[in-house]
Image: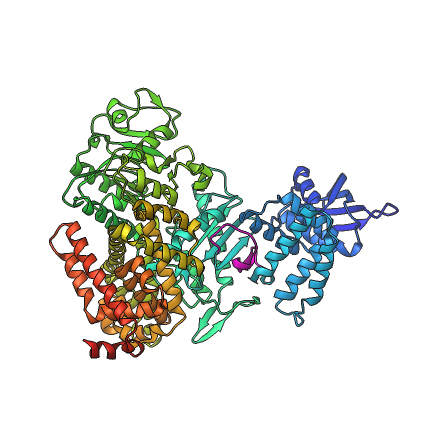
Amino acid sequence: ARLEHQPGAPADHLMLWVAQPGTPTPLADTLPLLESLDLRAMDEVPHDLRPAGAPPVVLRVFSLRAGAEAAAERFPALLEAMDALMDGRAEADGFNRLVLRAGLSWQECWLLRAMYRWLKQVGFAFSQTSVEAALAAHPAAARILISLFHARFAPDRADRDEAVLDDAWAALLDGVANPDEDRILARLMTLLRAVLRTNFYRDDDYLVLKIDSTAAGDMPLPRPWREIFVHSARMEGCHLRAGPVARGGIRWSDRREDFRTEILGLMKAQRLKNVVIVPTGAKGGFVLKQAPASGDRAALGAEGVACYRVLINAMLDMADTLDGGRVVTPDGIVRRDGDDPYMVAAADKGTATFSDIANEIATGRGFWLGDAFASGGSQGYDHKAMGITARGAWVMIARHFAELGLDIQTDPFTCVGVGDMSGDVFGNGLLVSRQTRLLAAFDHRHIFIDPDPDAEASYDERARLFARPASSWADYDLAKISAGGGVFSRAEKRITLPAEAAALLGLPPGPVEPAVVMQAILRAPADLLYFGGIGTYVKATAETQADAGDRANDAIRVNGAELRARVVGEGANLAITQAGRIEYARLGANGAGGQINTDALDNSAGVSTSDHEVNIKILLADAERDGVLTRRQRDDLLASMTDEVAALVLRDNHLQSLAVSLEVRDGARDLSSHAALMARLEGEGTLDRAVSGLPVAAALTTRAAAGEALLRPEVAALLPVAKLWLTEAIGDGDLTADPAFGAALLAYFPAALRDRFAGFAERHRLRRELIATIIVNAVANRLGPAALGRLAAENDPVRVSRAAWFAGALFDLESLYDAIDRAPAAAAVRLDATLAVRHLHELAARDLLDAAELDGPLDAAIGLLR
């Protein structure tokens, strides 16, 4: 291609020659590319050329009018931009006008485009057209932004003095009269100053920015600690972390315009879910921008994998690796933050089978975690095969029923739900008990109804579907369904239910829309409502559909007060809004109030399994380096420990469920302590009541006057926040260095590792974090938030943790707690006995807060005081 001024014409008249072998780009496709560069085509003259011995070439000659002064020195950048646009590397939009107007390269325009796309994801009020216009009107602002970016991140830059650029920026903004343009430009600068790393100089086909979210301006709460934003012509994605050591899944999202909103909600839940493990919460996701035509599943899957690879590489671009004890930053990356080597991935919606892909990338890049980077791969713990997420949720469900006087393994109970038997969480969950009588369920394709199921026959049929690859409710043997039941397609405009099915769901006879049937299933009178599928299906009456943040299910969603099931289990993430949970706990189950926790507690077993896998692999990688075992031996050892890892994980679920029940049982007595703890957590910045769905101070005062207590989902939300508070406090001190915690560290690992690899556990890279997590879970689960609030009212939380651990060890309370838990007595009797021990534990810890022995090594003090 060649670009020149038209001889004898005004300065904005240009001639463009483009030679294209073979079939040229259609004119209708070419004109938008030129327009995006601020070049308007006045006419085009094509010439067919047939060079000797070469394929035919079409020479296209365009007469153009430039939208701004067209200096000849900008022609090379315009031609490079045109080439990138025609190749699909660049996107055709108004940001490209800055090549002509500001003298930017197309890559620098791409940077500004990516910055805007991130701003749009966090709710920036201005449209892309407005931002493009503001930059076009103030090309000097674009140049300063780009110059500052180069000053901060160019790898070969010797001079990084930003003062001159800062002064120029301040002077420029003083001269911007339009207030909207001023806001747009200022917001771009705020974001730029919050960028910590970028791959801009690595010549990748994607652009990634690592952002300090706390410094990046207004955005929905909660703010991540760090986030990664990835932009390319074929995909966009993000990865949000609540702390430097954080983990969570990578989701293939279909919410192109607001995927960060989806990921943020999942990160929030993950942060609370992760209190039982070492890392805090993280979540990532990506969307396709060039998805193949619908129906081509193979092409769609290939494009999804390709875009997933982009996100994984981008995450690793923004992370350091370790070489022995040395921290190594990827080539071409200038970092404006400290060491940041802990980066992991996990499976989520759409990426359940992608762990080996992620580990292949990490291993190929020499990332220090190797195949511990993405848990659940071929040499890891398969969550679906273990059924671990569902088993963890059903530990919680079993407690709800036990406290209602039912044993889910011996007493028949009815169930409705969301999901199908091919799914991990729903499928495994519906196989936990042979007493489950599934009345109705739906997924994204079908509605299943069985008005009077035979428990044994229906269990066997569900097991058959679970074992069948990619099964759906349409594969269910209709002969196994009771009279008046069936399987119905959600694609139908109307469904006419048999009389028995209509009666079960309380629907009138005659045709109804599928959405009405699904709402009726959610409201059905059953013992259990179990969520195992993607989506948010319940909100509070006072909430709008938009508050639920799941537009796909707006037509199905019901209110918490309308749920008539006695128990709700959230095997899936975000099935119910927190306000919806609270409303259900107060008004659901026909006004009696229903039994519910939060998704963060119910489905934490999956992430706990992933973290155990990672920490075990870190330990065994150390042993491999020392030649103690081979990779084949490591893989065999990992597999042999599957059942014990599951048992360790499920114990965490059991203890958290017990902790919530004990806290609820003390009820109104503890409300003032809960209020004081919330006030302290809020004052220290650990708690945001609106984000956590916890009542404000005035509401607590009203409840106290009425003799009311926190509801179960509120306690379930407060307990993880209290654990976060303790974790942050302990992480800053030396408590984890006390040798008394060595035995607890070993107990975290399966017996085979305790026996053979104790030395490697002691020097584990995350030893400090592991011990902190062990202490926090033991103290918070056994004492509960109210007692923690009372003990910490005038004491440092680290000292409280030390005293609580000390008291438990002195009286050997753990053995007593476990003995009561195993006793052949009713749940209520065991709860009361455990509560009595909990009160003893609190009193002993209080007495020990001032003990001089608490200031020395704990082992010596325990030996002395026993």
Q: Is residue 419 visible?
A: no
Please state the horizontal and vertical placement of residue 690, each as a whole percent of the image: 44, 49
In the foreground, 648 or 318 = 648
Please state the horizontal and vertical placement of residue 695, each as a whole percent of the image: 39, 48
- From the viewer's perspective, tell me whether residue 463 is left or right of residue 7: left
Image-quadrant location for residue 733: bottom left
Vertical position of residue 383 compared to residue 29: above or below: below
The extreme top residue here reads 510
The extreme left residue here reads 824
Vertical position of residue 47 compared to residue 790: above or below: above
- From the viewer's perspective, tell me whether residue 372 is left or right of residue 79: left
Query: Chief secondary structure of the magenta span?
Result: loop
Vertical position of residue 100 compared to residue 847: above or below: above
Q: Is residue 297 visible?
A: yes
Residue at left 37%, top 74%? 734
In the foreground, 543 or 463 = 543
Residue at left 31%, top 58%? 785
Q: What number of labels is visible?
A: 0
Colouring scheme applied when the structure was drawn:
rainbow
For the C terminus, the quadrant is bottom left
- From the viewer's perspective, tell me whether residue 141 is left or right of residue 845: right
Please provide the residue range marked out in magenta.
Answer: 204-223
The extreme right residue here reads 8
Please state the horizontal and vertical placement of residue 402, each as a whole percent of the image: 19, 47
Residue at left 64%, top 51%? 84
